[in-house]
Amino acid sequence: MDITSLVSQSVKNLKPISWGDTSYEESYLVLKWGENPYDPPPDVQNAIAKCSKVNVYPSQMGKLKEKIANYCQVDVGQVCMTNGADKAFRLLAEICMDESNEVITFTPSYPVFDTAIQATGGKLKRLALDKNFLIPSVSKIKKAVTLQTKLIYVCNPNNPTGNFIATSDQLEELLALDVLVVVDEAYFEFSQKTALSLLAKYDNLIIIRSLSKTFGLAGLRVAYMLGSPKIIKYFQTFEESVEVFSIATPSLSGAIAAFDALAEIKKNIKLINKTKDTLTAGLAKLGIKVYPSDTSFILFNLKSQTITAAEFLTKMAKRKIILKDVSIYEGLSPYDCYIGIPKENDIKRVISTVKSVVRNY
Ligand SMILES: Cc1ncc(COP(=O)(O)O)c(C=O)c1O
């Protein structure tokens, strides 16, 4: 028997996302994921370290949900916890999609959402962002919507472009359609701009947020979805039926402690935003085109330096700075490069290394 005949055809059809290496020696500066470069506050680290009782299943999900409901000023019944935002995509795909359905996404954008949809056999309609990385006119988007369209995914601000691709008015126009509008706010706290106020008005809005970047807890894998209780109820029921203890005890403890340490977390966010400005100015001074960012990374374009992103990446890696290979995104130019914001202390090293590469020292 051909054992692979047991794998679903939609999974066989998936185009794998090749993220490259995920481990490096200590001396490397890894700026490929847009991680928060700072350790979480000491109380958060202590809460994680104190989790010795791992012989029993996690028990603090209710407490974390209450913290999040309070933070977002919504009811607990509007919150669904997930193991990272990436898991939220899979839940959406599993709960809403089948082979007859379609989803609208934009390019370039975060590719994991698309992959989660494709794994279910759902069809993607990918619409290109314009030259300023903004969504097409809502009338154009409406033309792409059919009776089979279930979801529209808006990554706001967008990975990899870093900007807000849709205004609140545009989101409202999309919400007037008979589809779920999924707004990915993984970077919300860097700008504080959110679609949250629309939740009270629209049952078809789902917001996804993550503790990975803004809270500096990427290793804990904690994220949440917000929506109308009418729809979130199904996510909760499904999750509690198939994976009742989805979030590990240290992750729950660390996340709960993080909501008690918001003042310190906000300080980190402010520092990252300041360092982002310094990096933007440093790259611009070298004549590099930098796109504005409301995230923990920057997209820049090396066309003026006549070096492609692929060459640049290789030369940076030789100098022990690791950047992301952006060929995983559809619709970027070969000169577009992604860099996570480093610690303030590393900014000189980063800018001088970029300078040595583009000036060919
Ligand atoms: C826009 C966006 N959504 C979701 C994620 C995944 O977040 P998490 O670490 O919570 O899975 C990322 C990670 O880079 C992202 O950029």
Image: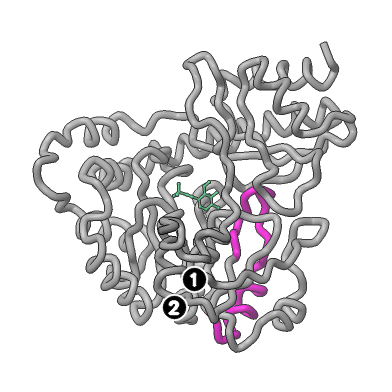
Side of 4 where 167 appears, left or right: right
**Residue of label 2:** 200
Cβ of disc 1 within 8 Å of ligand 1? no
- Residue nearest the viewer, comparing 154 with 307: 307
**Residue of label 1:** 197
Q: Which corner quadrant holds the N terminus? A: bottom left
Side of 31 where 72 appears, left or right: left
Residue bounds of the magenta highlight: 154-179
Side of 185 where 71 appears, left or right: left
Residue visible at 24% across and 35% down in the picture: 48
The answer to whether the residues at label 2 and label 1 have Cβ atoms under 8 Å apart is: yes
- Residue nearest the viewer, comparing 350 with 309: 309
Q: Position of residue 114 (x, y in %)?
A: 57, 61
Q: Secondary structure at mark 2?
A: loop
* Residue type, label 1: Ser
Residue visible at 23% across and 68% down in the picture: 241
- Residue 189 colored in magenta in the image: no
Residue visible at 54% across and 46% down in the picture: 190
- Asked if residue 320 is positioned above or below residue 224 in the image, the reply reads above
How dense is the environment of label 1, judged by Cα within 10 Å: few (below 14), some, or many (20 and up)?
few
User: What colouring style does the render use?
Assistant: one colour
